[in-house]
Image (cartoon, grey):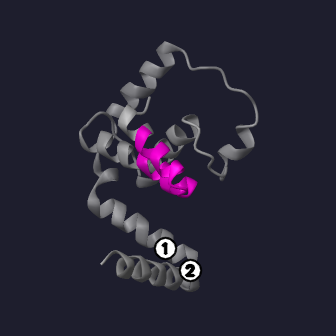
Amino acid sequence: MPERETIERARKDAREGKSPSTQAGEFVREEIHHIREGKHGARSTEQVIAIGLSKARRAGVKLPKRGKSAARSKTRRKKASAKRSRAVRKALKREPRKAASHRALSKKARSTARARGQAKRSAAARKAARTRAARS
């Protein structure tokens, strides 16, 4: 269950007309904090992001469905039993914490940017320069 502040920040983003991915970023950020403080661990940075996006979808953020889970999600799923939830949480607690380190996150960001291609990267850089100029 996401924290109330996270949901409020995401709703504020929605009111301001920001994109669903920006709203979902709040949930991913919360997940990173959880892993860093040892609430649970994750094997990879992708897992950290996936958990955050899953929370965002459950909270009502209109995110596009991607990947393998998109085909499965059409069926209604029952709420997991308490026993299963406990088992999952216990398993995640045994996982390492390195997936949410600054180094791991920056590595993931760079590899994702590379996968997008040069044109998209330079467009993002131009946009960043414009928003920086607008702020100062």
Contact (CB < 8 A) between labels 1 and 2?
yes
Q: Is residue 34 visible?
A: yes
User: Is 12 on the left or on the right of 67, as rendered?
Assistant: left
Give 23 or 78, whichever is nearer the viewer: 23
User: Which residue appears at 48% of the width and 14% of the height?
Assistant: 83
Instruction: Identify residue type, mark 2.
Output: Lys
* On-image quarter of the N terminus: top left
Q: Estimate how packed mark 1 is, as few (under 14), some (14 to 19) or many (20 or more) residues with alpha carbons within 10 Å.
A: some
* On-image quarter of the C terminus: bottom left
User: Which residue appears at 52% of the width and 46% of the height?
Assistant: 53
User: Is 29 on the left or on the right of 66, as rendered?
Assistant: left
Magenta residues, as a range?
8-27
Query: Residue 28's x, y, as percent?
Result: 42, 48
Query: Residue 82's x, y, as percent?
Result: 48, 14
| Circle 1 SS class | helix
Which of marks 2 and 1 precedes in the sequence? Answer: 1
Give 112 or 87, whichever is nearer the viewer: 112
Q: Which residue is mark 1?
A: 113
Query: Taking 117 as reference, is 67 above or below it?
Result: above
**Looking at the image, is mark 1 or mark 2 nearer the viewer?**
2
Between the residue at mark 1 and the residue at mark 2, the CA separation in whole angstroms equals 8 Å
| Circle 2 SS class | helix
Query: Residue 103's x, y, as percent?
Result: 28, 63
Labelled disc at residue 120: 2
User: Which residue appears at 41% of the width and 45% of the height?
Assistant: 9
Query: Taking 13 as reference, is 124 above or below it?
Result: below
Q: Estimate how packed mark 2 is, as few (under 14), some (14 to 19) or many (20 or more) residues with alpha carbons within 10 Å.
A: few
User: Is 61 on the left or on the right of 124, as rendered?
Assistant: right
Query: Residue 111's x, y, as percent?
Result: 46, 71
Q: Main secondary structure of the magenta part?
A: helix
